[in-house]
Amino acid sequence: MSLDVTACLKALSAAFCQYRSHTTDQNTKDLERQIDVLIGITSSGKPLRGFNAKELLPAECLSSLVGLLSESNVKPSLHTKAMVLLFNLANVRETREILHTTYHLASTLAALLHRHHLASNEKMILQCLQLLERVTYGCKITTPSGYIEELIRYLVTNTQMPESDLTIPCLGLLANLCRHNLPIQAHVKALENIKSLYRTLIAFLSHSNLTVIVFALSILTSLSLHEQLGEKLFNSKNIHQTFQLVFTFLINGEGPMTRRSSVDLFVDLLASPKIQQSLLIHEHLAFYLEQILALLHLNQAEEAAKVFELLLTFCSVTGLRSLVCRALFSPASSKPKDPNVNSAYNVVLYWASQSVDTHSTVSLKALDFIKEIYEELVDGGLLDQLSPRTSDLVPVLTQLLIPPTEIDGAILKQKCAQVNKALEVLSDILGIVLGNLKLDYWWKLLEYQYQHNSVGTRSTLALSWSLEGVSVVLQMLDLLCKLKNDVKGLKDQLASALQDQRLVPFLARSLSSDSRNSVQKALRILCEANSLPDFQGIWLGDLIASNNAAREEEMTLLRRPTETELSPPSSPRHHVSITNGRNSSSLRSVGLDYIPVKITAPVKNAHHDSNIESLIEKMKSGLEIKPDPHASEIMDIYEAKMAALVTKESHLQDLLEAKALALAQADRLISQYRCRRAQSEAECAKLMQLLQTTEKKAEQQAEQINELLQAQKAATKEMEVMMRHNENLQAVAEEHEQLKIGFAEQSQRLETSQRSLMAAQDEHKALSDLNEMLRRHNDNLKSQHDCTSKQLQELEQERKKVVQQLKEKDAKYQELRKALQKQEEETKQCEKNINDLQEKNESLKNDLTKAEKERKELSHKLSSLELICRQNEDVIKKREVAIKELQSELDRQSQIAAMIHNLSSGKVPINSYGGSSS
């Protein structure tokens, strides 16, 4: 965090303390002034460098700002400025998420909106809606309760009212609340005027403002995509018009908000398989893909990140990834008409090469997009048809593998994620870029993880990027294992790296991970390392066992406060409820802050307790117990009850010990808080002294100004007398007035230049101190270098001795090597058998898929043939009737022919023929 931002945050925190202690007009003005300073710093739209909402000072300022909004007896101008500052700070995704989840800003703003809605303060309502729209983007609200229900009702009502300045913020906020939020969607659908809302949103689709259309379409998509109304809106006739409309929003959007909402709308629409199929057959899809790739030339990183999000969604649709790949490497994208414009592929590489320090998400999404593209090139066999241009990609990926200079910080987590994605891209293109790989940075990055990762150093202070660093080590070693046979000299380097004892904690953490990918990589690396002589497998087992034991202990500690049943099973239950000043919560671990504990008494079984109490009363009264066949059962119940009480007592003792530990830690935290408070009070005292001195100086300067004003008044009187006596000097007086105005402007410029000079001098002093510190550090490093050079000479002498000993043992090594070669031949034979089986398995899988496809085609053909058979049966029946008629006619003709034959032979008389013919 820069010094200016830190100073401003400290001043804001001090102003809040003064305002809370004494709510005077002066303290209110000081608070407004400090808020105005931060508004001026954040008004550019760029995130504050080094501002982390999880740190103490920024978290205190955010908490004070949110608390200020929850207060009712505050000036409206102070509320407005606090909302403007939060609006600027919420431009960063991490800050926005913390404001929503930790500080519950949405509920606070909903309550504030309710108060000002009753007071009809439209300016405050507009500011509140704009802040709510930014805070709720990408965040979910689990249950609509309290002021959230009133907020939804207000948004729905205001949307149906005549159009005003509040219409667009209301639509945007309602779209954010409904997107991917099933409870809010169900609540909105249960409203009485939902049909009227649908009619209003459909009417907004013909609006002249593109933003209004996008918001209305987004709300309709969230509420009715998988319902009957959605099927009517997005049927096969309307969906292509919707595609053209959304593509127009993307390409010709009215601003970043419209383009962002258009991307979200397209992503939501593509969740439907029917819409995916409709997009594949869209007429102008190839043209629109080229236009979307051209949007990557935008200078804003957030807009480019949203474009990459849309492209990744396209790549997830079956059959669409190849079209995106062809559009990226098409001649129009590769060689644009304007020579000053880079190709789409070069722009993708530009965004992928950006540092996560300045562009947190766009680089990661660009690397994901490159991975999808090259997977399609390799798997789809498009390497010969398209030019993959890997010669430009490899330097970018190599540059990303340079180890960072920092040791801790939130940026390192994203840096490790960036390195992981770069290694994943390299794993996809290993066969293409094998000759261009440079492994120098790989070993440096591996050494950096060994030296600074808390998993490798076994530090008790866990870093936020440790797990991502473990993934980097695994991914890198997995790639090196794949490259060992293709890169000269890599086998020896890899063997020494696998036998390094610093690798063992990384493997242990990965093998006990819940990620399937991490476990599989660790197993592959373990198979490579297990055959090496110096691999420490025993230590690996010990570390895995300790990790599992620590996890089991943590789970028992997490489960212990929430257990509801104690052993034995028949024992009564007890409940432990924990309350603090604001809300109730359950204790998650022993190490949390101390919270007052309320332990309710266990509920007893009335029947068994009455039997036991009656038995005790009889024993105390001295009555003789008669032999009863149920007495043994009663005694067994009594003994079981006593055992249950003993176990409950032991559990309660464990709970008391846990509470004692929590109390001790709370005492430590209280002492730390007191120390910090004392430090802050000391700083406040210093600031008060500075303020008093500046006030004294201001009073002195005010007195001087009053004297000058009195002198000026006297001079003006004399000038008026002279002007009365001499009219010729009037023109000179006017020129004098103009010169006075110029003098005042010059004096103001001089003051501003003096202030900037003082600031530059302070910065120069700070830089000179830093230079002096670096010079001392350089001297220390030189002395350390001399010491290490002496040690290297000594080690060189020792090395020569060890070389002589190695020559003596070389003969023994040759014998062992022969035995090892035999074992390697056996293992190679086993590997060949495994590879053969795997190839057969893959071929069987391919045959199975082909058979499945043929089965589907045959079933389709069978259905068509059945239809044809039915039609043919009708035709056959008609033809059978015709054949029968023809057969009867044929019989008659045959009889006539037989008679003619008989007549010709003279067997039948003519009279009979005449009778038959008649």
Image (spheres, rainbow, N blue to C red):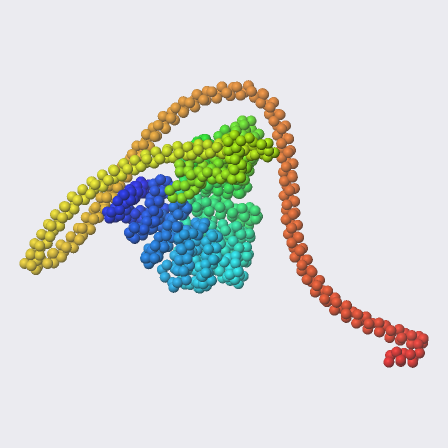
Tally of numbered tags: 0
Asked if 429 appears above or below 214 in the picture, the reply is: above
Residue at image location 91% in from the left, 79% down from the top: 912
Which of 741/214 is in front?
214
Please state the horizontal and vertical placement of residue 25, each as a whole percent of the image. 24, 48
Asked if 609 appears above or below 268 in the picture, the reply is: above
Q: Residue furthest left?
A: 725
Please state the horizontal and vertical placement of residue 539, each as a whole percent of the image. 52, 28
Q: Is residue 785 visible?
A: yes
Residue at image location 19% in from the left, 49% down from the top: 746
Q: Is residue 196 left or right of residue 117?
A: right
Q: Residue furthest right?
A: 907
Which of 483/679 is in front?
679
Residue at image location 61% in from the left, 27% down from the top: 820
Asked if 214 appears above or below 604 in the picture, the reply is: below
Q: Is residue 325 visible?
A: no
Q: Is residue 159 left or right of residue 686?
A: right
Q: Is residue 352 left or right of residue 23?
A: right
Please state the horizontal and vertical placement of residue 172, each as a whole percent of the image. 41, 56
User: In terms of image quadrants, where is residue 862?
Assistant: bottom right
Residue at image location 8% in from the left, 54% down from the top: 717
Please state the horizontal and vertical placement of residue 119, each as a whole percent of the image. 32, 57
Image quadrant holding the C terminus, namely bottom right
Which of 563/599 is in front?
599
Image quadrant holding the N terminus, namely top left
